[in-house]
Image: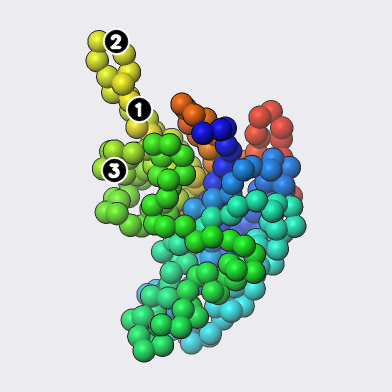
Amino acid sequence: MSDTTTVVVPDAQIPYHNRKALRALIGFIGDFQPDNVVNIGDLADFPQPSRWSKDSRLEFEGSIYRDAEIVARDWSEPLRAVYDGPVGIHEGNHDERPRVYLEKYAPALSGTKAFHMETLLKFDEYEFTRLPEFYRIAPGWLSTHGHRGGIRLTQVAGMTAFKAAERFQQSVIMGHTHRLGKVSKSYGYAGEIKSTLTGVEVGNVMDMKRANYLKGATANWQSGFAIVRAAKKSVQVDTIEITGGRFQVDGVSYQVS
């Protein structure tokens, strides 16, 4: 296996995204030109068919198409303007809301796939690939959104992913928690490390002020993303924090503006 780089884009939950942070991240991808881009899921929020909106006015607004247009405006089109490489996207628990809603309340219509994430967000037009729930992102590493596989959430950044790594006996990189962190544990004997399991959570590019379900609170979230550098015998995963209106990669500073 030759050296490859993958930029892992975190939860954005458009239209609750931090527009400046997402724009800066896309600009970085254009400069960095990785071999792959993986979106960890919850690219869109689709609040209308969520269980939190059931029997409320929001459920009947019918604006998932408007939100899909915002995804195209702020993610798909800007990304494809600067990067023409492979883009894979996990389906998150928010991305799946329209599909699950239709399957639950109008199953006779669900076979059309009209409300599947890849249809609403025009994967064919933008040449995006829907990734399986668990994807071999690098040797010994799985990527997943984080809402499947019996993964239990913790409040410590990186620990949810590490617990998943212990469960699967594979290192895990995931989203879902909106936290940014990395936790590792090594195993061996006779003074030699035989293996290391690592869990990485890739943060978010959300605007907490837009996430009205927080009801004005500040969540235990960290903004950022991750870079996976895979070689034949090693995998290095770097978590990149977005803080103070900027982030740095390989000594280069990027302004969030």
In the image, 244 versus 42, the foreground residue is 42
Residue at the disc numbered 1: 196
- Badge 2 amino acid: Gly
Label 1 to label 2, Cα distance in Å? 14 Å
- Measured from the top left, where is residue 47 in percent x and y? 48, 73
Label 2 to label 3, Cα distance in Å? 25 Å
Which secondary structure lies at badge 3?
A: helix
Identity of the residue furthest to the front in this view: 1
Task: Please indicate, yes or no, whether residue 24 appears anywhere in the rendered image.
Answer: no
- Measured from the top left, where is residue 138 in percent x and y? 46, 39
Residue 228, label in figure: none
Crowding near the residue tagged with mark 2, few <14, some 14–19, many ≥20 C-alpha atoms within 10 Å: few
The disc, 1 or 3, on the residue closer to the chain's N-terminal end is 3
Judged left or right of residue 63, residue 201 is left
Which secondary structure lies at badge 1?
A: strand
Judged left or right of residue 197, residue 201 is right
In the figure, residue 19 lies in which quadrant?
bottom right
Residue 168, label in figure: 3
Crowding near the residue tagged with mark 3, few <14, some 14–19, many ≥20 C-alpha atoms within 10 Å: some
Which secondary structure lies at badge 2?
A: loop
- Measured from the top left, where is residue 187 in percent x and y? 28, 23
- Badge 1 amino acid: Thr
Residue 38 lies, with reference to residue 112, above or below; the image says above
The disc, 1 or 2, on the residue closer to the chain's N-terminal end is 2
Residue 15 lies, with reference to residue 137, above or below; the image says below
Residue at the disc numbered 2: 191
Task: Please indicate, yes or no, whether residue 56 appears anywhere in the rendered image.
Answer: yes
- Badge 3 amino acid: Phe
Label 1 to label 3, Cα distance in Å? 13 Å
Name the residue located 46 percent from the left edge and 26 percent from the top edge: 233
